[in-house]
Image (tube, rainbow, N blue to C red):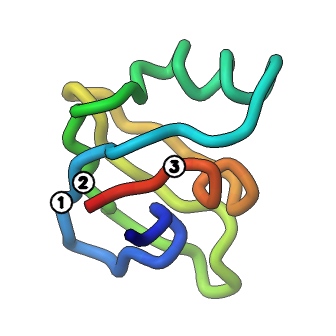
Amino acid sequence: MKTLREISCGQTVKVQKLTGEGPVKRRIMDMGITKGVDIFVRKVAPLGDPIEVTVRGYELSLRKADAEMITVE
């Protein structure tokens, strides 16, 4: 199992599980990132922060720390 942070640009992955808790997990879920959703990684900044993704047709930017909480396959 990998986290979203380990996925390279141009790949589409499916969310397996969200780790973390409280407000951070809530914020990720409010973005529409939930179990079973496909995430397309559009762009990763040179230092890995932020990671730009497309989820459910929306373009989002995720912090590196948030991406580490999203387990994908």
Q: Earlier in the sequence, mark 1 or mark 2?
A: 1
Q: Which residue is mark 3?
A: 70
Identify the mark at residue 12; answer none if there is no mark: 1
Residue 24's spot in the image, x, y percent?
77, 28
Outermost residue toward the right? Answer: 22
> Residue pushed farthest bottom?
46
**Res 73 quadrant in image:** bottom left
Residues at marks 1 and 3, CA–CA distance in whole angstroms? 14 Å
Crowding near the residue tagged with mark 3, few <14, some 14–19, many ≥20 C-alpha atoms within 10 Å: many
- Residue at the spot 68% in from the left edge and 48% down from the top edge: 66
Say what amino acid the circle numbered 3 marks: Ile
Please, is residue 70 above or below residue 50 in the view? above
Judge whether 49 appears above or below 54 on screen: below
Mark 2 or mark 3: name the one nearer the start of the chain.
2
Residue 13 in percent (x, y) is at 22, 57
Question: 19 left or right of 3?
Answer: right
How far separated are the C-alphas under marks 2 and 3?
13 Å
Whether residues under marks 1 and 2 lie with C-beta atoms below 8 angstroms apart, the answer is yes
Label 3: element kind: strand
Q: Is residue 73 above or below residue 61?
A: below
Q: CA distance from mark 1 to mark 2?
A: 4 Å
Q: Which of 69 and 43 lies nearest the eye of the viewer?
A: 69
**Crowding near pointer 2: few (<14 within 10 Å), some, many (20+)?**
many
Tell me the amino acid under the disc marked 2: Phe
Foreground pick, 61 / 37 = 37
Q: Secondary structure at mark 2?
A: strand
| Upstream in sequence: badge 1 or badge 3 | 1
